[in-house]
Image (cartoon, rainbow, N blue to C red):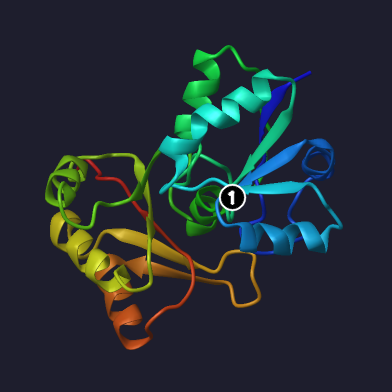
Amino acid sequence: MSKLFLVPTPIGNLGDITIRALDVLRTVDFILAEDTREASKLLRHHGIKSSLRSHHMFNEHRTVESICSRIMKGEKAALISDAGTPGISDPGYLLVKQCIKNDIPIETLPGPTALIPALVNSGLPCDRFCFEGFIPTKKGRNKRLEVLENETRTMIFYESPFRLVKTLEELAERFGSEREASVSRELTKLYEENVRGTLAYLADHFRDKPPRGELVIVVAGKTNK
């Protein structure tokens, strides 16, 4: 039966993939990859030879129609991102929306995503949280932070190593320098690092020790004292 599979891929350690995900990647007619070079490393590691096609934020508006057409003709496709679950701060939403519009079955597999291990590892409340992804770098940045000033749930952000210190400083200014937070770096990889403390402490720490790799910021929500 023709179908679109959304397949999470490891966020670092190539062993963090399910048996079911590997079975799907082996049996689909083609795999849509955010970066075919990164995808090839994963596929080679697991001996998978399925056809690869590029699908990323710069071409997805042009390619969704042709992808849906292939699936509607009887093919099975899998969508993967460079790391984690497709659609979470990665391409996926537009294709899913178009498949739903065309009554194409969609099956989403469970699997890796950086936000959950970072949240649990932070030591901050996990019962209620909000995922904010990447804060806009320019337009809309101040508005987004302003809205979050009164957020009582634990907040999770993705950030690049080049903007981490600036973002921590801005969060400290908006939420208070003593607000508890944590930064997780290179989760599941050899040099994984989790640093916990106040926003002021974290900004000082990473100003002295510039980070590398993928980063997740977890910030405690506002408390009503």
Say left or right for 182 vs 86: left
Question: Which residue shows up at 70% across the image and 23% down it?
Answer: 3
Question: Which residue shows up at 67% across the image and 24% down it?
Answer: 71
Q: Is residue 103 among the parts visible in the rendering?
A: yes
Is residue 141 placed above or below 62 in the rendered structure? below
Image quadrant for the C terminus? top left
Q: Position of residue 93 (x, y in %)?
A: 46, 33
Q: Residue furthest top?
A: 103
Is residue 2 placed above or below 20 in the rendered structure? above
Q: Quadrant of residue 219?
A: bottom left
Q: Position of residue 25 (x, y in %)?
A: 78, 43
Q: Is residue 128 among the parts visible in the rendering?
A: no
**Residue holding disc 1:** 84
Image quadrant for the N terminus? top right
Q: Quadrant of residue 202?
A: bottom left
Q: Residue furthest bottom?
A: 208
Query: How many marks on residues?
Result: 1
Q: Position of residue 129 (x, y in %)?
A: 40, 39
- Residue type at mark 1 is Gly
Question: Which residue shows up at 20% across the image and 65% down it?
Answer: 177
Q: Residues within 10 Å of mark 1 (few under 14, many from 20)?
A: many
Dot 1: what SS? Answer: loop
Is residue 165 placed above or below 33 in the rendered structure? below
Residue 54 or residue 163, whichever sits in front: 54
Say left or right for 153 vs 118: left
Question: Which residue shows up at 54% across the image and 45% down it?
Answer: 55
Is residue 136 placed above or below 194 in the rendered structure? above
Say left or right for 12 vs 121: right
Residue 188 or residue 149, whichever sits in front: 188
Q: Quadrant of residue 8?
A: top right
